[in-house]
Image: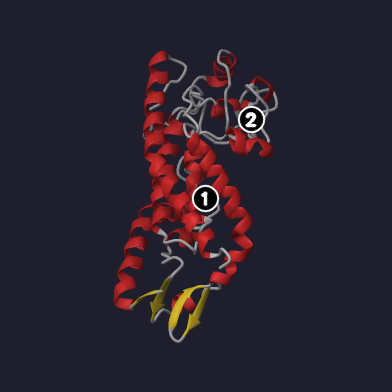
């Protein structure tokens, strides 16, 4: 085990907290004022890692901390002769989930990226039900215009958790019905939501992995979320977001360009997560 003195680990924890607070503090300030942000709140509300948890640095399995009572007080840590470290015994109940997640990441990475969806999942979530839209922002083309865009395109969504928010009239318009049982066979690296989900995969590995990768995936997820909503049917110009008008050839080309850039950015992070899961599985392997 690598053992870090407080003078070694505390700057790492402080740097992590400062980096995270660039995102957590504006969110908390909005929450105090009772303000909603349809773009940024998603990272804190849909993905269930609290701001304080995002701010907390973890050293990961195999690293011990000296003079660390704040970590000793956490349930996932143990203290032995003054050295505080992650409780490896807690890894046992994670093994099935780790194996499934490894399979998901591996299969996703093995597939070619598809770039023909044009972000229409957000449009399908309000199709013929604009009064029940998920965000308070107005629809850029109005209800009828939004429905027309959906009806003039083929829906080819491959992401289970995007599809489950489609309105009932939109579901039959997708190339196929999607349930949880299809996730391993359908997830592909061009999907913006699959890229955002790397953040959830990363934080679910805590505290067994060093926490930097959680912030790395969070920052990518935030950039993806912004484009996801810029390409949506909502008018977010009051928040400074210019629309990506995917109903036009120019908008489609811009969406695909950004989609490909995100796919490229996600590739090394997906590989890192696979490597970390393999390390955790190997650490718990018999013998």
How many neighbours does mark 2 have within 10 angstroms: few (below 14), some (14-19), or many (20 or more)? many
62 left or right, relative to 145: left
Q: Give residue 223's position: percent from left, percent from top.
A: 39, 40
How many neighbours does mark 1 have within 10 angstroms: few (below 14), some (14-19), or many (20 or more)? some
Q: Is residue 214 visible?
A: yes
Considering depth in this image, is 243 or 252 the residue closer to the camera? Answer: 252
- Pointer 1 with pointer 2, Cβ within 8 A: no
244 left or right, relative to 7: right
| Residue at screen point 54% across, 39% down | 107
Which residue is under mark 2? 166
Query: Quarter holding the C terminus?
Result: bottom right
Mark 1, mark 2: which one is toward the viewer?
Answer: 1
**Secondary structure beneath label 2:** loop
Which residue is under mark 1? 201
Q: Give residue 282's position: percent from left, percent from top.
A: 51, 60
Q: How far apart are the alpha carbons under marks 1 and 2?
A: 23 Å
Residue 170 occupies which quadrant of the picture?
top right
Q: Is residue 118 above or below residue 60?
A: above
Q: Is residue 252 above or below residue 54?
A: above
Q: Residue furthest bottom?
A: 81
Q: Is residue 48 above or below residue 197?
A: below
Q: Which mark is residue 60?
A: none
Specify which label sits upstream in the sequence, 1 or 2. Answer: 2
273 left or right, relative to 95: left
């Amino acid at each position: 085990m690598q053992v870090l003195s407080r003078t070694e680990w505390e700057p790492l924890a402080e740097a992590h907290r400062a980096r995270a607070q660039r995102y957590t503090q504006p969110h908390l300030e909005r929450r105090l004022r009772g303000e909603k942000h349809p773009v940024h709140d998603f990272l804190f509300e849909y993905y269930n890692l609290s701001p304080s948890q995002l701010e907390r640095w973890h050293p990961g399995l195999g690293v011990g901390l000296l003079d660390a009572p704040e970590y000793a007080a956490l349930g996932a840590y143990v203290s032995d002769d003054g050295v505080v470290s992650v409780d490896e015994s807690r890894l046992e109940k994670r093994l099935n989930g780790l194996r499934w997640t490894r399979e998901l990441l591996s299969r996703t990475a093995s597939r070619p990226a598809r770039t023909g969806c044009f972000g229409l999942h957000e449009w399908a979530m309000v199709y013929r039900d604009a009064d029940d839209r998920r965000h308070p922002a107005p629809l850029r083309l109005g209800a009828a215009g939004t429905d027309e865009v959906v009806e003039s395109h083929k829906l080819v969504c491959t992401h289970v958790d995007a599809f489950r928010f489609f309105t009932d009239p939109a579901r039959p318009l997708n190339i196929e019905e999607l349930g949880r049982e299809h996730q391993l066979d359908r997830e592909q690296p061009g999907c913006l939501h699959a890229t955002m989900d790397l953040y959830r995969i990363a934080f679910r590995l805590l505290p067994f992995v060093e926490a930097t990768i959680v912030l790395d995936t969070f920052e990518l997820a935030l950039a993806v979320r912004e484009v996801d909503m810029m390409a949506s049917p909502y008018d977010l110009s009051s928040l400074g977001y210019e629309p990506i008008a995917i109903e036009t050839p120019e908008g489609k080309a811009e969406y695909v360009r950004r989609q490909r850039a995100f796919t490229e950015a996600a590739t090394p992070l997906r590989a890192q997560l696979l490597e970390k899961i393999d390390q955790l599985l190997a650490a718990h392997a018999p013998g």
